[in-house]
Amino acid sequence: MLEAYATTGSSDVLCRLGASSHQDLQDTLLALGRSPTIARSTSVVVLSVVVEPRVLPLLEARPRTGPSRAPRYGRAPAGA
């Protein structure tokens, strides 16, 4: 797994995986499917880059607001 993001919408988490071959990708997806913590998954293969990553200029232009990290899943809030 290269990256993972908490998301809004119909998905909970978006993961970016790296694989050395189609077989490696299939083996990884099958292993994920056997995990008791994953109810379902959808996979997509990227064919080409449409917009190159451009994070730093965007982040430098606007001050950060909001929480400093993603929420912790699977634990009840304190006092619950």
Image (cartoon, grey):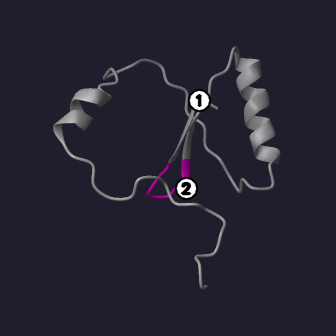
Residue at 57% across / 39% down in the picture? 15
Pick out the residue farthest to the left: 61
Q: What residue is at 55 percent from the left and 50 percent from the top? A: 13
Q: Quadrant of residue 50?
A: top left
Q: Nearer the viewer, residue 73 or 65?
A: 65
Q: Nearer the viewer, residue 39 or 2?
A: 2
Question: Is residue 46 one of those drawn in magenta?
Answer: no
The dot on residue 20 is: none
Q: CA distance from mark 2 to mark 1?
A: 17 Å
| As drawn, 2 above or below 79 | above
Identity of the amino acid at label 1?
Answer: Leu
Q: Quadrant of residue 36?
A: bottom right
Q: In terms of image quadrants, where is residue 74?
A: bottom right
Q: Residue at x 69, y 14 (%)?
A: 20
Q: Is residue 78 left or right of residue 25?
A: left
Q: Which residue is mark 1?
A: 2
State whether residue 56 is above or below residue 63: above
> Where is residue 14 drawn, in percent x and y?
53, 44
